[in-house]
Image (cartoon, coloured by chain):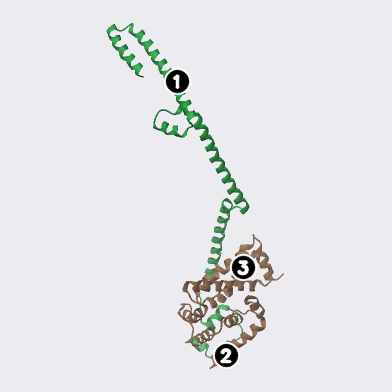
Chain colours: A green, B brown
């Protein structure tokens, strides 16, 4: 073996003075080797890796200001959000109460209305019921009066027997309503 | 201004940094590679750690205070990166430093980039029997050609301790190689 012959002089081993080539020194004394042309390819690999690390870092830095806030600003922003949310909830509640007081006209005599009546003050409910009854009676009476007038006018052009039947039916319907 | 000072100045200049870093790689990658290789044993591991070392150098050069030479500062980074690599591997394999040392020879002889003859295997075996401190000091002094002052800066050990440890190690090697 060439190497063994070279290293055969054991007394001179490690005492041959300095070897300038680091790789040769390691190969000669420790038997460790490297792939051919390793340092050329490794230089390129290191520079490429640094470039990719830097570009990744730059992207991270660009994104950071959007998400990153100083701690004092974070608390301020959180407090502002809570305040705005609180105001919104309070405002909605306040407008809801007013709506209950003024929206009687929207109510009608159905199950929802009866359910709502349980939640409304008795005095207010009675006032609403009176108003509703008056509204029903006055409007409907007015409408039926107009219908009767129209009927009499039409009767001038229709046969007496037919109009008699029609008026008696209509009067009965108007009275029931 | 000496060569190293000029290089540091260029490395700290943002416009000249990349060119200067290429120069730095030309001048130091081979030496740092061998420094790392002796700690992490195989070529594959040394390649990984060398890359990490230079990335760290690139990122930290702006903060380099010039309290030591660039040369020793980079050796310290390479040394710390190598230890970090070993610690990471220890955690993965649940091994302590003694187990790693005992496996060093096994791993070295299995490495495709090891082609040792009888005397080289013997030297590796003797060095593997040293304490961690003795091993590092011998490697840095004999193979990396660092001065005792530089080794002292890298390992944080007094120069007198380094000298006595190194000469003891050399004596052991000479005796065992000759016998």
> Would residue B97 be found to the left or right of residue B72 on screen?
left
Taking the view exactly as shown, the residue that stands out farthest to the left is A161
- Give x and y (percent) for residue A65: 59, 52
Residue at (53%, 66%) from the top-left corner? A45
The residue pinned by badge 2 equals B174
> Would residue A117 be found to the left or right of residue B149 on screen?
left
The residue pinned by badge 3 equals B23
Dot 3 surroundings within 10 Å: few (below 14), some, or many (20 or more)? few
- The chain letter for the residue carrying disc 3 is B
Co-location on one chain, circles 2 and 3:
yes
Dot 2 surroundings within 10 Å: few (below 14), some, or many (20 or more)? some
The residue pinned by badge 1 equals A134
For the residues labelled 3 and 1, the Cα–Cα distance comes to 101 Å
- Kind of element beneath mark 2: helix
- Give x and y (percent) for residue B7: 66, 67
Give the number of the mark in front: 3 or 1: 1
Co-location on one chain, circles 3 and 1:
no
Labelled pair 1, 2 in contact (Cβ < 8 Å): no
Taking the view exactly as shown, the residue that stands out farthest to the front is A122
- The chain letter for the residue carrying disc 1 is A
């Amino acid at each position: 073996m060439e190497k063994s012959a070279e290293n055969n002089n054991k007394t001179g081993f490690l005492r041959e003075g300095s070897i300038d080539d680091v790789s040769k020194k390691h190969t000669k004394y420790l038997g460790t080797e490297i792939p051919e042309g390793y340092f050329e390819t490794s230089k390129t690999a290191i520079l490429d890796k640094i470039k990719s690390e830097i570009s990744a870092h730059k992207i991270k830095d660009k994104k950071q200001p959007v998400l990153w806030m100083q701690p004092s600003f974070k608390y301020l922003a959180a407090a502002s959000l809570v305040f705005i949310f609180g105001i919104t909830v309070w405002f909605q509640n306040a407008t809801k109460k007013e709506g209950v007081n003024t929206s009687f006209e929207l109510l009608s005599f159905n199950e929802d209305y009866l359910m709502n009546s349980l939640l409304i003050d008795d005095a207010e409910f009675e006032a609403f019921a009176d108003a509703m009854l008056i509204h029903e009676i006055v409007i409907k009476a007015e409408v039926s009066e107009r219908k009767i007038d129209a009927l009499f006018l039409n009767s001038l052009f229709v046969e007496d027997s037919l109009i008699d039947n029609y008026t008696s039916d209509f009067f009965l319907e108007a009275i029931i309503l | 201004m000496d060569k190293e000072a000029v290089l540091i100045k260029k490395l700290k200049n943002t416009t000249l940094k990349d060119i200067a870093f290429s120069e730095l790689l030309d001048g130091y990658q081979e030496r740092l590679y061998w420094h790392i290789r002796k700690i992490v044993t195989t070529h594959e591991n040394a390649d990984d750690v060398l890359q990490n070392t230079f990335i760290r150098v690139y990122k930290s050069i702006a903060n380099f205070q010039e309290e030591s030479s660039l040369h020793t500062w980079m050796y310290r980074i390479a040394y710390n990166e190598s230890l970090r690599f070993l610690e990471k591997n220890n955690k993965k394999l649940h091994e302590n430093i003694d187990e790693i040392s005992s496996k060093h020879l096994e791993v070295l002889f299995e490495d495709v980039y090891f082609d040792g003859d009888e005397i080289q295997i013997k030297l590796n075996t003797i060095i593997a029997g040293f304490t961690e401190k003795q091993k590092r000091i011998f490697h840095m002094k004999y193979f990396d050609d660092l001065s005792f002052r530089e080794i002292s800066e890298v390992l944080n050990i007094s120069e007198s301790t380094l000298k006595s440890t190194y000469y003891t190690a050399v004596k052991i090697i000479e005796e065992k190689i000759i016998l």
